[in-house]
Amino acid sequence: MALPREHWASRTSFIMAAVGSAIGLGNVWRFPYVAYANGGGAFLIPYFFALFTCGIPLLMVEYMMGKRARGGAPQAFEAVRPFMSWAGWLACIFAFVITTYYCCIMAWSWDYVWYSFKLSWSADASVFFNEQVLNKSIGVGTLGAIQSHILIGLILTWLAILAILWKGIGAVGKVVMVTVPLPVLCLVILAIRGLTLPGAAAGMTYYLQPDFAKLADARVWLAAYGQILFSLSLGMGILQAYASYLPKDADISNNAFMTGLTNCGFSFFAGFAVFSALGFLAYLEGVPVADVVKAGPDLAFVTYPTIISQLPFWASFFGVVFFIMLLTLGIDSAFSLVESFATSIKDATGMRHTKVVLWLCIIGAVMGIIYTTRGGLYWLDIVDKYASDYGLVTIALAECIVIGWIFGASKFRKEINDTSEIRIGFWWDVCIKFLTPAILIFILVKSIITNILEPYGDYPLWANVLGGWGMVGLLIIVSILLGIKYNCRRVE
Ligand code: PFF
């Protein structure tokens, strides 16, 4: 006999888990840079506009879809419209592929916690990262040997995910009570340290000085929407899976507002820690802040370590705090990405939770080995580019079409309002039916055209075809096959 579905122990556990999924590496190394490059302080206008017109409305869609279907993303799509489960499978598989490289970035962070004790990167953090840690090969065509120190970090990360997910959603609810506040505490420590360094004011000016002229540029608005989707972990099937463990009378709209605002507040604050430190580096090197601004792995593993070495006291301590922050930021995003797939498989097949989680962790760890090789970073970069350009946007668009047009926005809004603390009005219908899908179509078409006209990065065409188009195509085929196999089937 099937067991009754698990529930979150409390509303707080659910909100913390959703916030934990949203707040990830992207908040620290993506948001501040995107903000700076798209108008500084003025970027907050399109950013908050995107939050209220796309981010929060889509959070409500995903929460409600999961809650009403009491199943993962495929079941949630299927419950709205038969034969749509493939869209949910696509979301979960994309999430899983993202986890495989996300965990590799966390593997570097484990190593850097260790390196921080001795400030092992010495005078040149760039040489250390590229030549010693990654031991980068000459190009994408040369994979080279597995780097054992990265592999150890990868295994530790997957063991942590396995341990956290093993006991089910109840245990997740407890873990997030630690993994959400801890990086916030680390960030506060780093922001205080950063803001009290010389040059911090110049860094902050760079970050926040508004350039209102940028608001006339459509690309700035698109960047805001892209950042919101990515940051709130939308279109990955995560929130449907998490919401499927909510009780029937759970609130939707207020939970969505709380999650969205907390995540964006954290991102904004992260900019203080990042840009004050960049200001300090610029001050030391006697160059403008623009010359030291970086994003992505370069910011975390080259620029930040360089800054840490220059700190007047307790450099190792701040190094450890920074990399523990990255680890705790990443872990709840990583396990939410796995839980998305795990919940869907469990709901479709009736397999035991522990068995599904164990297999996913083994497969994920094995798939991640490619990123631990000397050519791993190149592949990570390509897969990340295509997965985040196409995955989230396509699924979010499918959600708008299925809910806004096929099911009916106002009918769905009524369902949301029936159990919610904040009643949402007609504006929500406009966002889900017109505004958000129009912008998503624009983003999607623009990405397709750009990527066809010009292969991504400096990589050869074959690498783009294999790691980019091929990967996206394969995931679409697999999700359609899964949709056919498990159509309309759900084991309670
Ligand atoms: N929202 C998290 C972050 O910003 O890091 C986790 C995440 C979700 C990463 C979805 C990547 C992604 F495509």
Image (cartoon, grey):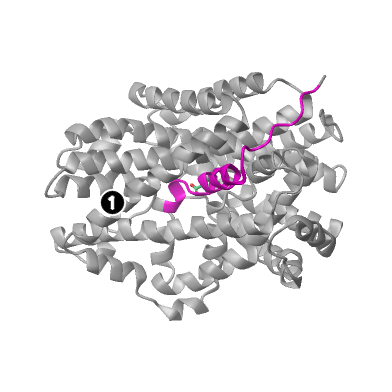
Q: Position of residue 288 (x, y in %)?
A: 22, 67
Q: Is residue 450 left or right of residue 113?
A: right
Q: Position of residue 441 (x, y in %)?
A: 68, 62
Identify the residue under disc 1. 190
Residue stretch rendered in magenta on the structure: 2-27
- Identify the residue shown where x is 46% and y is 50%: 26
Q: Place residue 281 in its image quadrant.
A: bottom left
Q: Is residue 490 left or right of residue 295?
A: right
Can the viewer see residue 84 in this picture? Answer: no
- Identify the residue shown where x is 85% and y is 56%: 407
Label 1: element kind = helix
Q: Is residue 348 left or right of residue 457?
A: right
As displayed, is residue 111 above or below residue 389? above
Q: Place residue 152 in its image quadrant.
A: top left
Three-letter amino acid code at the position of disc 1 = Leu
Classify 10 Å Cα crowding around label 1: few (below 14), some (14-19), many (20 and above): many
